[in-house]
Amino acid sequence: MSDQRHPPSPRFDRRRLLEVGGVGALGLSLQGFLQGAEAPGRGRPSPQEKSCIFIYQYGGLSQLDSWDLKPDAPAEIRGPYKPIATATPGFQVGELMPELAKVSDRYAVIRSLTHKVPVHDVANKMLLAGSQLPPSDAPAFGSVVSKLKPSRAELPSYVWLQKFGGGAAPPEPAYLTGGMLGMAHAPLLIGTSHDDNPAEPGFRVKAFDSATGIDQARLNARQQVQSQHGQPQPGANVAEIETWQRMRDKAFGLLAGTAARQAFEVDREPPEVRDRYGRHPLGQNLLMARRLIEAGVRLTSVVGWTGLAPSEKFVSVETWDMHGNAGISIFENGWNGLGFALPRCDQAVAALISDLDERGLLDSTLVVLVGEFGRTPKISKGARATGRDHWPHCFSALVAGGGIRGGAVYGASDREAAYVKDHPVTLEDFTATLYHALGIDPGTRLSPDGFTRPASTGEPIRELF
């Protein structure tokens, strides 16, 4: 695989932008409004351009109760759920996923992901970076995509729906700063708390609001002044000037235009479409993600929080961390139980895959569903409730679209889904596979010297394509 060498790109942090143009004075509250500023051209993406919706089952889904059931194992390992047939002959999934079972011909499952770290925050950082030993400034997968495949639309390249929270969250620099690629490739974060719930009536994204007192007339006046007087400092090269001008124009466009705002407005969707995805945080966030991809966003990350059962109080967005330590058994119907969370996830993800397919977007949209690790084969009996504990040695993921071969199962676990039996997949190989699906050479160098820091050191799983 050949290396792709790229010359250094001009770096524009917020302070530099204020120096060269004063766009920050507009009152724009977007943390990453300049994503994609270096994109060559504008408008809707062409059919050949690939996008991605990356869903994090934050906390770690039990592989034994979803994608990799072991019905012949002892009861303390197999759990209470039975396998059901899918649309793919010989492929079974857990009974809590009937909708995904119906569309199995449109996705592949990897049953042999593996690493060695059973600690949430560290493992999440590893997953974000696609590396078992990520450096402290490693950019997240989405930031790399923003850098190498920026959006051509007047929207951010990279959007993150629902912030990580609680003790399982990775450090924020791992996913909210862009790492060594800089803030220009940080995601636009929507949903800083559980109250930012698109399933609630009256939900509104406020990221595009201008500062108090700046109306459209003042915005237009500032744009005119910027065009006449706001220029890069003397000595800037032509490429830097052109990049700065695109940044300025995109900032004004985001503030003054309607396309970005409307892309986030899920209430524009027909009620039956919203019902199809599910009137819960994951369902509506995935519907929003589809709208964003359709509008031209390159990558949307979604934390797989499924919300609360009736009468429950908020504890955490760590839906899939099912030890039983929240007082809810892994097999019960509360927010932290599979009986509640997995059917909601099943509904939402199946609706997303089907909806993308019906709209002609699945071939150009990679869908990823994965957590930072799996759960222990043996069910634990805690003081408060039963659960399964952290288990990184063998876990599963769903990948769909973007050229992925539907109805495929890659890799295999042993008889207890404890260890990989065939075709182990490292985080490096997994992430290289995602880059390959998006048309990005994993060997592309990210560092200014053009030699170090490839996007991934892994090898794509070509059997999945």
Image: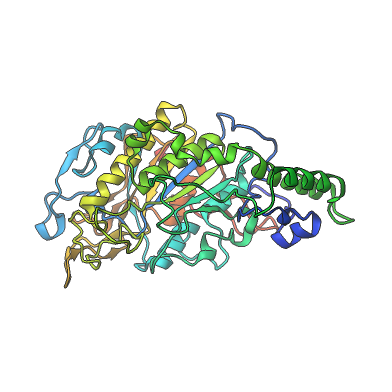
**Farthest right residue?**
234
**Farthest front residue?**
213
Q: Residue at x 56, y 48 (%)?
A: 158
Residue situated in front as seen by the camera: 53 or 429 = 53
Residue 38 seen in the figure:
no
Residue situated in front as seen by the camera: 1 or 203 = 203
Residue situated in front as seen by the camera: 422 or 437 = 437
Q: Is residue 275 above or below residue 326?
A: above
Q: Residue at x 36, y 59 (%)?
A: 317
Left or right of 398 on screen, residue 446: right
Q: Quadrant of the C terminus?
A: top left
Q: Is residue 336 above or below residue 361?
A: below
Residue situated in front as seen by the camera: 84 or 71 = 84
Q: Residue at x 83, y 47 (%)?
A: 225
Q: Position of residue 217 (x, y in %)?
A: 74, 43
Q: Position of residue 84 (x, y in %)?
A: 17, 39
Residue 383 seen in the figure:
yes
Residue 380, by quadrant, is: bottom left
Q: Residue at x 31, y 55 (%)?
A: 395
Q: Is residue 63 above or below residue 392?
A: above
**Colour setup of the view:** rainbow
Q: Position of residue 36 (x, y in %)?
A: 64, 45
